[in-house]
């Protein structure tokens, strides 16, 4: 049994809210306050209302990277952020790789998406495979980023510029850095 009250408008129509009542046909008993002789039973038809909108949910999908790179170069990681819900929201989207972290604030309406790009400037000592992660409050994605060791391609060494006169037949030792 649901007990409620209603006030009629100028035309004598009463509006009553039945929260959380499933759609259907319901018999309703009524009586009019201050007029105990006015009572009765009526059939009330409850129609289904619009469904509640889905809350915002930011899905993350890494779509591109600039890898492979060599140490000292910058890696770019692009992710698509999609609000799969119906409601608007603003979230901080985080990026992490090695010991580097960054974030961007993203605002999306329901059903909207946007690409975002993060960057990591590798150090000259960075080489190997690293896991890049992009994460919203609701989802995350990751990919492997390769930083390849640098290799000399057309190495030219100008020894004459750094030689001093010395013993004939001696040995010269040098180290090539790239």
Image: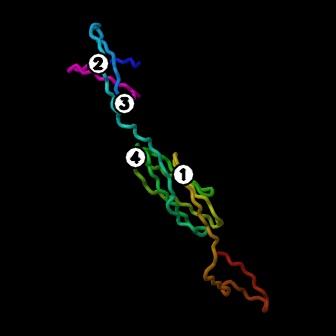
Q: Are marks 4 and 2 in contact (CB under 8 Å)?
A: no
**Magenta stretch contains residue 20:** yes
Q: Residue beneath label 1, please?
A: 140
Residue nearest the observer in this picture, 152 or 170: 152
Give the alpha-carbon distance from disc 1 to disc 3, as whole Å.
39 Å
Between disc 1 and disc 2, the foreground one is 2
The label nearer to you, 3 versus 4, is: 3
Few, some or many residues within 10 Å of mark 4 (<14, 14–19, 20+): many
Evaluate if marks 3 and 2 touch, with contact meaning CB atoms under 8 Å apart: no
The span from disc 1 to disc 2 (Cα, nearest Å) is 52 Å
Residue, x 62% and y 58% (percent of image)? 98
Where disc 4 sits, the SS reads loop
Q: Is 17 left or right of 65, judged from the image as shown?
A: left
Q: Disc 1 and disc 4: Cα gap in Å?
A: 19 Å
In the image, the segment drawn in magenta is: 7-22
Task: Report helix, strand or loop for mark 2.
Answer: loop
Measured from the top left, where is residue 113 in percent x and y? 42, 53
> How much space separates mark 3 and mark 4, taking CA atoms?
27 Å
Going by the image, does 171 lie left or right of 134? right
- Estimate the spatial distance between the alpha carbons at disc 4 and disc 2, rounded to whole Å: 38 Å
**Who comes first in sequence, dot 1 or dot 2?**
2
Describe the element under mark 3 as helix, strand or loop.
loop
Q: Residue at x 61, y 80 (%)?
A: 153
Residue under pointer 2:
7
Residue assigned mark 4: 110
Please say if the residues under marks 3 and 4 sit with CB atoms less than 8 Å apart: no
């Amino acid at each position: 049994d649901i007990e409620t009250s209603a006030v009629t408008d100028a035309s004598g129509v009463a509006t009553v809210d039945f929260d959380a009542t499933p759609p259907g046909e319901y018999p309703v008993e009524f009586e009019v306050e201050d007029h105990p002789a006015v009572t009765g039973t009526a059939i009330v038809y409850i129609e289904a209302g619009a469904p509640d909108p889905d809350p915002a949910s930011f899905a993350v999908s890494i779509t591109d990277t600039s890898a492979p790179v060599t140490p000292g170069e910058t890696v770019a990681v692009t992710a698509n952020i999609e609000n799969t819900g119906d409601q608007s929201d603003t979230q901080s989207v985080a990026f992490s790789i090695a010991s580097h972290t960054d974030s961007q604030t993203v605002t999306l309406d329901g059903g909207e998406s946007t690409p975002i790009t993060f960057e990591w400037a590798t150090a000259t000592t960075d080489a190997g495979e690293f896991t890049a992660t992009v994460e919203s409050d609701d989802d995350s994605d990751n990919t492997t980023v390769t930083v390849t060791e640098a290799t000399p391609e057309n190495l030219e060494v100008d020894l004459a510029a750094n030689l001093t006169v010395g013993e004939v037949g001696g040995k010269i030792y040098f180290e090539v850095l790239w």
